[in-house]
Amino acid sequence: MALPPLPQPYQDTAAYWEAAKDHRFIIQKCNECGEFQFYPRGVCSHCLSSDLDWQEASGKAEIYSCSVNYRAPHPGFADATPFVLAIVTLEEGPRMMTNIIGCDPESVKIGMAVSVVFEDVTDEVTLPKFTPI
Amino acid sequence: MANAMRDVAIVGVAESDLGRVPDKSKFQLSAEASRLALDDAGLSVKDVDGLFTTIITEGGQFSSMMMAEYMGITPRFTDSTSIGGSSFVAYVEHAAMAIATGLCDVALICHGSTNISDRGGKGGPMSASTEVFGPSQFEEPYGVSTVGSYALAAQRHMHEYGTTSEQLAEIAVATRKWASMNPKARMRDPITIDDVMNSRVIASPLHLLDCCLVTDAGGAVVLTSLERARDLKKTPVQVLGTGEAHTHRMISQMPDLTQTAAAISGKLAFERSGLTHSDIDVAEIYDSFTITVLLTLESLGFCAKGEGGAFVSNQRTAPGGDFPMNTQGGALSYTHPGMFGIFTVIEGVRQVRGECGPRQVPNAQVALCNGTGGVLSSTGTIILGRD
């Protein structure tokens, strides 16, 4: 079976993917302006400071928008349709792209409370996903 | 600067062969459209000293150098700004600036794409990469796609404002009516709101008929000074106002899923033109998806935020409606080679010149063209008027 496209970790993101592999969900907080950000970057996207720390996130989030996708966007999703593509707002503030899993795709609605779960896609890659609480 | 750009005109526009053109490369389509647009202006390739183009598919790196070499042009002003389908509308602003400041005399904007032939003649996704570099590694592993991204915006708009699938379908139906009057349009058979609603869901809430076509196509636009334009073949079409902006690259980073950068670029274009919404006789709004149009109309200020659904109801944008829009049949029914922006400009110019035959909007003096690029990421807005 074809694999979905998988992240190739780089300087900005290696720590995030390493933590995900250990089933930990971490995000960056700026020590200069105090803002959280997602996705991980080498600088703060609010103030351009390079003084960033990783913090364990609560893993709690709310669905900002969601769509049931019936067509595979890539051969790696051929057996995965329909799947729920969603943007969630993390309790800490930033938004991220994810999938909502562990439920009937048609039952997923905007505003639902969700929490992080970890999907081990390969031995090397784990994707944080979300499931309704 | 705003006033100086009024001294610039669009003098030539053209499409290449459209639809399925498997025997021609994207470079040839771009170059053939350029030749036709220069012919339309009464100019030759030897007059061109400014080139504006981008190719985002294979073989397109260093786009302006590559296309200049392909066509034998040695530009003294060159621009490969790459902000998606809106690039070619933004190029009108860049070209007008370059001409108004004397940096070039004759600007050629061109585009060519074999978007359907590249996929073996079938629609659907192209990507099959297995490793994702850069920030998009936070989206692609989750199965994000262009249609999926726009679907997220549509779903949010429905949630916040009660917009319905029927209201989105109004746009597809009206656009098809315009296409039926354009012999170059790919899809010309009338459709109903039920047809749209009953077409299969690709990514909820978007149905197949909410989505643009996938075609091969090329297009080109030629600009020069208004002074020189008055000695050329066609009625000059003045660049009255322009604006451009982008707010994000990836859909998960869009500040507000219900408002596009047209709120910025449109405001700039109106301010710089000194015109108001009631001055616009015809609108050419990039319609990658029905939701793109609805969000753009709101963001441009043609109606209040959340009222786009009501605005497009009762076939308001169709032939005979009081808001003529996407009069060549749009990306939904005419052509869509991956990036559509240049075709909004081509049709806006033709409407203002009054050369659109059965689909001509009576006495169209002022056109607004809006390109959207990426995933609702970037916009270019221009307002054009008859000299």
Image (cartoon, grey):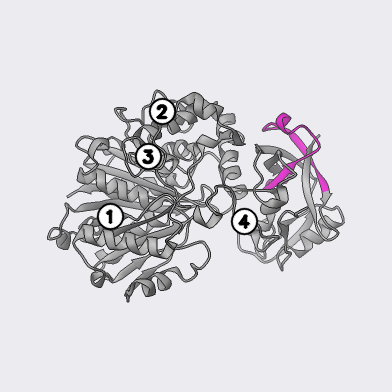
Above/below status of A13 relative to A119: below
Image quadrant of residue A81?
top right
Q: Which mark is residue B329?
A: 3
Say what secondary structure mark 1 lies in. Answer: strand
Q: Is residue B36 magenta?
A: no
- Chain letter of the residue beneath label 2 in the structure image: B
Q: How many marks?
A: 4
**Badge 3 and badge 2 in a common chain:** yes
Say what secondary structure mark 4 lies in. Answer: loop
Q: For this view, does A73 lie left or right of residue B41?
A: right
Image quadrant of residue B37?
bottom left
The mark that comes first in sequence, 1 or 4, is 1
How far separated are the C-alphas under marks 3 and 1? Answer: 17 Å
The mark that comes first in sequence, 3 or 1, is 1
Residue annotated with mark 2:
B311
Identify which amino acid the numbered label 1 is placed on: Val
What residue sits 30% from the left and 54% below the top?
B14
**Badge 4 and badge 3 in a common chain:** yes
**Badge 1 and badge 2 in a common chain:** yes
Residue annotated with mark 4:
B127
How far separated are the C-alphas under marks 1 and 4? Answer: 32 Å
How far separated are the C-alphas under marks 3 and 2? Answer: 19 Å
Circle 3 crowding by C-alpha within 10 Å: few under 14, some 14–19, many from 20: many
Q: Which mark is residue B59?
A: none
Identify which amino acid the numbered label 2 is placed on: Phe
Q: Nearer the viewer, residue A42 or A123?
A: A123
Image quadrant of residue B229?
bottom left
Identify which amino acid the numbered label 3 is placed on: Gly
How far separated are the C-alphas under marks 2 and 4? Answer: 36 Å
Circle 1 crowding by C-alpha within 10 Å: few under 14, some 14–19, many from 20: many
Identify which amino acid the numbered label 4 is placed on: Ser
**Badge 3 and badge 1 in a common chain:** yes
